[in-house]
Each structure stands twice: as C-alpha cells, then as structure tokens.
Image (cartoon, rainbow, N blue to C red):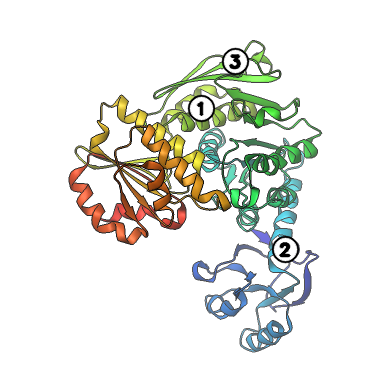
Amino acid sequence: MICIETLLSAKTIVNVFKGSHISEKSCFAVSTDSRSYESGSIFVALTGPNFDGFDYASSVLEKGCQVVVFQGSKSNIEKMNTLKSTYSDVMFIAATDTLEYLQEVAHLHLLDWKNQLCGQNLPKIIGITGSNGKTTTKEILFHFLDGVMPGKVHSTKGNFNNHIGVPLTLLGLTSQHEVVIVEMGTNHPGEIKVLCDIAIPNAGLITNIGSSHLEFFKTEAGVFAEKRILFDSVNSNTAKKGEFIVDGDDDYLKKLEKTDGLIYYGQDVEKIIGNTVAINIVQDHLEINSTEDGSKYYDCGPININNKYLTGTHNYKNMACAFIFANLLFPGNHQLLIQLATEFKPKNNRSVWHQIGENQQIFLDAYNANPSSMLVSVESFVSKCVADKIDLKHVLFIVGDMNELGDDSSKLHQQVGKKLGKMGVINVAFVGRFCRDYESGFASPCHLFLEKESLNEYWKEALKKYNRFFIKGSRSLQLESLMDIK
C-alpha cells in the first residue's frame, strides 16, 4: 500500500489533476494491468512501442478507480479532459514516463518503509539472482523465513522479477513486514543495476552462472558480469559487511572478492580461502557441515535434511543455499528450519511430480529452459529413474525449445540433443522451432512437433503407453497445458 503523499513526491510528475475526495494520507494498492484490476487500486498506465495502457482507463474507472497515472502526452491530456468530465472525483497524474514513475515511487515507498522501522533491527532487503534456480531458492527461503517470522516476510510472487515486477513487489510492503525477498531477473546488460538502484539490497545470493539469455550476454562471462552487480550493490550499501552467499562449486562465483559477509557453500569448497560451509548430497538426503573454522558464521553443527518432494542435486543445492542463508540471518532456529525443510514442496511447474495413475508419474519442469538447466534437470530425472528401477524404455521425454540463446541457438540445441542420447534417453519428442536441431544432435529415432498443439494427439496415445514422463521447455511453449489432456 502506498500513500498519495508519496505518489505526489515523484520527480517524474508533469502535472496533477486533483480529485475532490482524495486525502494525501489515503493509501492504495497499485495495478498496471486493466484486465486484472481490482477496485480500490491505483492504475499506472504503462506504455510500450505498440500500446498505451491509458487507452484502457475507462475500464478501470468503471470499477471505481480513484487515481490514474498516465503518460503526459498532448493526446493523452486531451483524453484525460474528456474522462474528467465524467469522473470529476478522480485524481489524474501525468508523468514524463509511467515506467520510470512506477520505479521511482516504489523506491520512495521502500525508503518510507525503512524509516518506519527505525529503532528496530535494520530491515533486511534480500536480493536473489542467478541463471538457474533463483525462483525455487526464493520460494524455499520465503518458506524458511516465514516459518521463523510468520507474517513479517514479504516476497516476489512467482517470478515477477523484472523492471516492472520488482517495483510492484516493493509497493506491496506494509508496516507489518520486516524482511523483503526480491528476485531479480535479467536478459539485457544493465538490468540488474536498475533493479538494485530501486531496491537497495543489503543482503543477497547468486545461485549460479549458466548459459542463459546468451542472445544478449553472448557468453557465460557476460552473464557473470551482469549477475555480480547484485554482489557489488550489497557491498556498496553495507560497507562490504552485508550477508551474501554463493555456490562455491561454481567456477565464476569463486572469482568474487572475499568480504566479511561472503559465504561459499558447496560440495568441494575446502580449497577456497574464506568463509565456507560444506554440503554433501546423496539421493534424497542433504548434509550440511561447518568447515574447519565455520563456527564463526555457521554455528549449528552437522545438519541432516530429508525431503521427499525434491528431485536432483541442483534442487538440494537450492535447499542448502536457503537453509544456510536463513540460519545466517536469524541464528538459533536450526531445529525449526530442519522441520520446515522436510515440508517444502515445489510448485508453479518447477520440478513438480504429478501422480496421474497407480503406476504413472509426470515430472513437470516447464517454467523455463536453458542449456544448463535442461541438462541438469534431465540428469536428475534419469538418476531418479535408475534409483527407482524404472527402465528408460518405459519413459517418455517431452523436450521443448530453449529460447533467447542468440546466434548459437542451433548449435546449443544440437549439443543438448547429443547429450540426451549419451544419458541413455530412448523415447523423446522434441517440440518447437528448434526440434530439428535437437534431432540432429540426438541422432536416433524421435518424434518432432513444430508446435505444441500438434503434440496433443500424440500425447493422448503416449499416456496409454509409458509409465513415467519428463516435460521441460521454455515458457512460451506452455507445455504444462499437457496436464489438462487425458
């Protein structure tokens, strides 16, 4: 909730056309989507190359909207005057740029929130980024911290982690919150810097560096240069004392300069000079241990965690990262955290198991895909099949496009196809515009579908034939919709 007083303090305002019944102390939620607008919210009309949200202002005004922020162009001022004749009680705010306005008021609201908590412990603003696993790690960390501090933790919803989602997350802060977890995504250089300037994080983590968004970052080194900006921002905001945790098994993250607040965790961190926590992952079991001088920053001794809902070393690493970080921020709660760790269940189509029959299961990981996440997900799934004594001839793999890989898209899809063959994959359907590149690398009989819709009939027959299914691809394919086909 944000008050009108804060809304009107933004420097991006061109003019304010006041409503007659609105107090500067009035507080509102914020919406940027006329389709999902809820009565009582402020409507910020974002613009783009081919749209202007102000064109849909009538629909939110009919629902009782009292404040509308719009791009202050000449044509929009004329449109506002027409609307004002019907909705005289509504406040209209003209801004130079409605996105910049949204970002500015979110930052101002964050500062107001921090000032309200003066006299208490410094509120934690936790930034999370990484190539893979950031949303899952964020969900686990929220699960932990909300268990320790019920109702006092606010977090990014879903993967609403971009230049619009981060401001909306911050605008959801209220006086009851003492911690906010802000997921930060990027697909262009410089975007993490923008998000950090808005959110001013004083703690954070980077899950890993992988082959994501190579269309714009070109190389993994470019990805690292972008992601590490979160680390630099936390250091700048805390005089290098802010809590920060990274995967010490990651070749790029090892390069971060040592600070008092930086902790490395991993399965092979003994050789790292600095604060380290060793972990060991075997099947469905996670063990966390202090290293030789670990008592300085990790004081709860050996921890053993079993979680029957997670699949794959990568997800247990996400669990370890969140556990160590939660214990670092709020020590003395490790027994509660162990219990919470056993209870966590993945959701939102991320590494989720679905039982669809007495002897049939679907592993759905269809929220996004890049080469590193695809390979680790397949490897984990195959290992699970082997452990469960499931012959891969009874398993079907549905593998979709990996988007935003730039000039190397064809080559990277071929490489993944080749590696699937080496992992022992037998039955596979490749879906999307890169299906023939997958096929070229796989070099064995397979099924090809240029569009997800053309897969539907084959899927119906496959459900009668196979016992276990693996589904993963980029979000644009919406492969999770297969779950609705019987």
Badge 2 vs badge 3, beta-carbon distance below 8 Å: no
Q: CA distance from mark 1 to mark 3?
A: 16 Å
For label 3, the SS is strand
* Residue nearest the observer in this picture, 257 or 308: 257
Nearer the observer, disc 1 or disc 2? 2
In the rendered view, does 297 fall on the left or right side of 318? right
Residue at the (73%, 77%) spot, across then down: 72
Nearer the observer, disc 1 or disc 3? 3
Image mark for residue 290? 3
Given the image, on which type of amino acid does mark 3 rest? Ser
Give the vertical position of 171 relative to 237 (above or below): below
Given the image, on which type of amino acid does mark 1 rest? Leu
Q: Quadrant of residue 12?
A: bottom right
Q: Residues within 10 Å of mark 3 (few under 14, many from 20)?
A: many
Residue 189's spot in the image, x, y percent? Answer: 69, 50
In the rendered view, does 45 fall on the left or right side of 110? left
- Of callouts 1 and 3, the N-terminal one: 3
